[in-house]
Image (cartoon, rainbow, N blue to C red):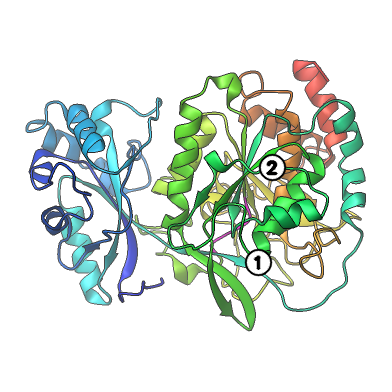
């Protein structure tokens, strides 16, 4: 696990607000920043981060992985909080929280609040965990791991170009059918987009500033970041979806290096507020209008960044980690969420990869997301593309997209599963310009993608999932399922 700048272990603390906690808060104070509230939340050395705005969400369902869910903690507080829903609404109205209205999570007294905090190093961390989790209002304490974008410094030649990839993905046919991503937003969760560069490379996608999110530590604004990994990802979206609007979620911004190769890193908690923003947006729309695709070309690449799988704080193997629940909640509202499989495959993993097996983990391994591996234009798996089985769902990756070709001009090649994922996201966005989640829910669209992937024999392999994306076959399948193409 990684420690933060203050020398502690980073965690996410999920609590149920109750009167004794609320009484310590001034009406206009930030719950995390208020010294009296922080004193109640900080036990045995756990320190709440006053600079991170608390998020409101729902707790893990009963029967989740955490053993804490089997304690009757809500019964313990119900005596003193008969109307916890009203209490939580009071907190949300008085404090700068982001409110996640999740219709599938009920009853209202099961609403919870998420804080970022840190634990002391060494044996004191276990003591702090034990004391915190014994408190009735604490639902759980979870790891807040680093996640990363990985590059390579070598200068392998590219193989093919973006035009050829467009041919392989039947983009002319998509355009002929009017499937260009018009009316669809693609959120690129990455290192920031440079829109001027994209337009200079012939892309006509426009920025959706209202749905963009920039991490608070950045000095840049959405669409105006240095040209790099995020711009590379945005370029791929435009191959199949030239008219989709781009939401710039610039959250993975800290440069680092491992094994002589460059990284861009962030804490998982840096990404979460952007997801909540997207969730709030969709919840305000009618289902036919919820045309949102979310592309994530990042991953947790080392097991030492996490608690062991048997710990309830774990992210890698735990579908009930708060971030993993956020991702599923967004899909429940109609969003299509894609994750890169990662570049920790054999025999050529990138520097910094620490998994000896099963590198597809955390949100990248959720059943509901579309997890994308990478092949070259000849359909051959690229040797760094992460292989399954996944750590949460075994059948990962789901399918493969194209990579390692010339296109954006930013690196020696548009390479990695970082390139393949937004390329597939562009295809999904193109389809969404015709089919809303009301008539084609995310699970049905994913099923059509997988069943039409080449060679479409219905067999899953840990190397390439169900095969290579084949949009022409997908269109045929959609025509038979819902018509209109």
Residue in the picture at 22% in, 64% down: 47
Residue in the picture at 67% in, 32% down: 184
Residue 301 at least partly seen: yes
* Quadrant (top left/top right/bottom left/bottom right) for the N terminus: bottom left
Task: Answer few, some or many: residues within 10 Å of disc 2's Cα (few below 14, many 20 plus, some between 14 and 19).
Answer: some
Q: Position of residue 239 (x, y in %)?
A: 81, 45
State the residue lying farthest toward the top: 483
Q: Position of residue 393 (x, y in %)?
A: 56, 46
Name the residue carrying label 1: 344
- From which residue to which does the magenta span run? 296-300
Can you tell which mark lies on residue 181? none
**Looking at the image, is mark 2 or mark 1 nearer the viewer?**
2
* Quadrant (top left/top right/bottom left/bottom right) for the C terminus: top right
45 is within the stretch colored magenta: no
**Based on the displayed image, in which of its 4 quarters is residue 64 positioned?**
top left
299 horizontally vs 309: left or right = right
416 horizontally vs 355: left or right = right
């Amino acid at each position: 696990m990684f420690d933060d700048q203050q020398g502690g272990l980073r965690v996410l603390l999920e609590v149920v607000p109750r009167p004794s906690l609320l009484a310590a808060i001034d009406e206009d104070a930030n719950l995390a920043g208020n010294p009296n509230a922080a004193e109640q939340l900080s036990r045995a050395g756990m320190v709440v981060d006053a600079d991170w705005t608390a998020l409101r969400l729902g707790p893990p369902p009963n029967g989740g992985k955490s053993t804490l869910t089997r304690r009757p903690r809500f019964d313990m507080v119900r005596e003193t909080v008969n109307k916890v829903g009203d209490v939580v609404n009071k907190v949300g109205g008085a404090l700068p929280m982001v409110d996640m209205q999740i219709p599938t999570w009920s009853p209202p007294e099961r609403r919870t609040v998420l804080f970022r905090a840190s634990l002391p190093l060494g044996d004191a961390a276990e003591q702090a965990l034990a004391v915190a989790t014994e408190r009735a209002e604490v639902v759980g304490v979870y790891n807040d791991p680093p996640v990363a974008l990985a590059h390579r410094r070598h200068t392998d030649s590219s193989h093919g170009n973006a035009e050829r990839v467009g041919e392989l993905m039947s983009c002319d046919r998509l355009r002929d059918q009017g499937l260009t991503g018009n009316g669809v937003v693609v959120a690129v969760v990455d290192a920031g987009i440079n829109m001027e560069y994209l337009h200079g490379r012939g892309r006509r996608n426009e920025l959706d500033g209202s749905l963009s999110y920039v991490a608070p530590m950045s000095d840049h604004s959405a669409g105006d970041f240095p040209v790099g990994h995020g711009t590379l990802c945005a370029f791929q979206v435009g191959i199949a979806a030239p008219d989709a609007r781009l939401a710039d979620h610039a959250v993975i911004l800290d440069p680092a290096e491992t094994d002589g190769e460059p990284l861009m890193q962030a804490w998982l908690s840096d990404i979460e507020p952007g997801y909540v923003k997207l969730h709030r947006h969709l919840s305000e729309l009618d289902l036919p209008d919820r045309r949102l695709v979310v592309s994530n070309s990042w991953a947790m690449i080392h097991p030492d960044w996490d608690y062991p799988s048997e710990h309830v704080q774990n992210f890698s193997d735990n579908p009930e980690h708060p971030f993993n629940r956020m991702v599923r909640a967004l899909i429940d509202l109609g969003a299509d969420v894609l994750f890169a499989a990662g570049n920790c495959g054999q025999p050529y993993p990138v520097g910094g990869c620490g998994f000896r097996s099963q590198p597809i983990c955390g949100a990248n391994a959720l059943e509901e997301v579309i997890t994308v591996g990478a092949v070259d234009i000849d359909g051959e798996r690229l040797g760094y593309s992460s292989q399954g089985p996944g750590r949460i769902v075994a059948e990962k990756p789901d399918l493969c997209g194209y990579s390692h070709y010339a296109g954006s001009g930013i690196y020696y090649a548009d390479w990695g599963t970082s390139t393949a994922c937004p390329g597939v996201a562009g295809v999904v966005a193109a389809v969404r310009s015709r089919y809303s989640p009301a008539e084609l829910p995310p699970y049905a669209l994913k099923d059509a993608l997988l069943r039409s992937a080449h060679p479409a024999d219905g067999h899953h392999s840990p190397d390439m999932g169900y095969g290579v994306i084949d949009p022409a076959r997908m269109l045929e399948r959609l025509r038979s399922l819902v018509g209109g193409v």
